[in-house]
Each structure stands twice: as structure tokens, then as C-alpha cells.
Amino acid sequence: MTFDGTLWKGVYPAATTQFDNDLSVDWDATQRVQVALVDDGVDGLILLGTCGENNSLEPDEKRAILKGAVEAVAGRAPLVAGVSEFTTARAIDYVRDAEKLGVDALMLLPAMVYVPSPAELQAHFRAVAAATSLPIMLYNNPPAYRVNVDFETLDALSDVKNIVAVKESAPDPRRFTDMLNRFGDRYEVMAGLDDIALEGLMLGASGWVSGLTSAFPVESVRLVAAFNEGNWQEARDIYRWFMPLLHLDAEHDLVQSIKLAEQIMGRGSERVRMPRLPLTGQRRAEVIKWVEEAAATQPSKRTAKAA
């Protein structure tokens, strides 16, 4: 571990993996994306999550991206590595390597493709947690992964000391209150869907794992800061300005949309690996329109102009 501060607080963008024209990993561009987000004030980075195209990468590429991020960020913000593997054995190998490479924490998903029983899901999480001393945030996203990390599962895992947080991406904001009522401070809870982020914070989430922060980091950081300061009107104003884009995070083409937004904002490239393809046609035109409208009305630009 390289970071000595507090985990699971504030804004954690799910950083994208950048590709060259031949769709090989663009190592330098990937590091530039990571460093630029930290420079803009985010509180941590999620590496190799959905937006990092984890399952489109080879095992050696994943490890090289983690190594590069540790070197590039140099302890300025916590680095959380996504764990998204097809088998428990592969996940165990990965978390052991991630710990050796110097990341600060892990975001653990259910095993890919296979839909487990509750007992199988718990066994997977326990086995991976036992292979590392790093703190772990479980990722609950039933619409995307067809698996619900339900409260009974969290009850059963409460004795696993390094499972300490949950990224909550179920689309029902009532989950935040129900979880905090049931578990108190046993698990930190982070808002995981962009378009219920402010609701999550108001209901007790400790932070926000965000997709669209990759394109608009300054506004994302200010949104959470305004909330923490009790400046509700500013927080609502930013949230309402942001919402047309935040809805993109809940769609199946979120990676392509977020990377296109990054490209428009001069922060990265829209290139993605198959089976994903860049947006085309009406969908592409819609996303470009929304991003350009957001860029033209950025709250940070209005604030700077007023000053």
C-alpha cells in the first residue's frame, strides 16, 4: 500500500483504460488519464472496473496497468483495483498480484458469467478475501451482473474483517437506508450509480464511485464538496446540470458513452475493445449533443466568469 489516508470517502472515478489505434493498451495515455483526475481533486481511483474494460484485458495487461498507476499516482490518492474474473482461482491469483504491486484496496465482483447460489457467492467472496490483507469493497450491481449481494449475504460475511465496504449500484435508493439501518457502521456504503449519487449521499453513503467524473471531474468534486458543506442549493444545481449525462451511467453502453465524453472534453479517446464498438448513428449524435451542451454550461466556467 502506498496511501495512508482515508478510504471510501468522496469521489472515486472509475478510470478508463486508453487504447492506441491498433487497440493495444496505450500505457502513457492511461497514466495521463489517472494523473489528470488526481490533479483535478478526486479522492481516489477505481482501476479496472467496468469503465476500465477489465474483462477485455489480458491478465498481463491488467497487472501492467496496476503497476503503472501505482508509479504514476505515487501515493497521492488511494488506488482500488477491480476484481472481475471468471473463476475464484483466477481472482485469488489476481488479488495476490495486486497487493504485491502496491494498490491500496480492492473492489470485488461476483465471478463473471456464472450466476451463483447464495452459498456459492459467499464462498467466492470468502476465498478471495482470505487471499489478501487488502481492504475490500463488494460491488453490488444486479442489473449488470444478474447477481444481488443481498443483506443475508452481507450478514453471513460480517465476520470477514477485510470486507469493509459495499458499492451499491442497485437502482433503488431505499437500499442505502435499509443497509445502514441493518448494519450500522459495519460496512461503508458508496453510491455506485451516477444518477442516484446525490440521493445516496443524502441517505448516508460515504462517497461516490462515478463514471462521468472521468469527463467532468471538477463539477463532480464540487458536487460532493457542496453536499459536505451543507450547501444544498449548489449541490442540487450541479446535480440537475449533470443529470442528462449521469443517466448514461445506467445504460449498457456506458463505457462507450463515457469514453466519447472524455474525448469531447479532451481527456482521452473513445476507442474501446470488442465486443464493444464506438457509438454510431442516432445514439452517438445524442451523446455528443448532451456532452456539448454540458460543456457549454459548466458550473465551474460560470463560477470562474463571475469571479
Image (cartoon, grey):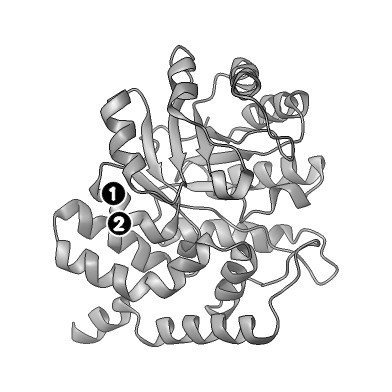
Indicate the quadrant where residue 253 lies.
bottom right
Q: Identify which residue, 169 or 265, lies in the foreground.
A: 169
Which residue position is annotated with label 2? Answer: 198
Observer-nearest of 99 and 11: 11
CB-based contact (under 8 Å), mark 1 and mark 2 = yes
Residue 185 visible, this angle: no
Residue at horizontal 54 percent and vertical 39 percent from the top: 80
SS of the residue at dot 1?
Answer: helix
- Is the residue marked by circle 2 packed among few (<14), some (14-19), or many (20+) residues within 10 Å? many
Q: Which residue is mark 1?
A: 201
Q: Residue at x 81, y 72 (%)?
A: 21
Residue 66 lies left or right of residue 148; in this view the side is right
Under circle 2, the secondary element is: helix
> Could you tell whether 2 is left or right of 63 in the image?
left
Q: CA distance from mark 1 to mark 2?
A: 5 Å
Characterize the local packing of mark 1: few (<14), some (14-19) or many (20 or more) Cα atoms within 10 angstroms: many
Percent position of residue 25, x then y: 77, 58
Up-down relation of residue 2 to residue 236 (above or below): above
Q: Position of residue 101 (x, y in %)?
A: 66, 33
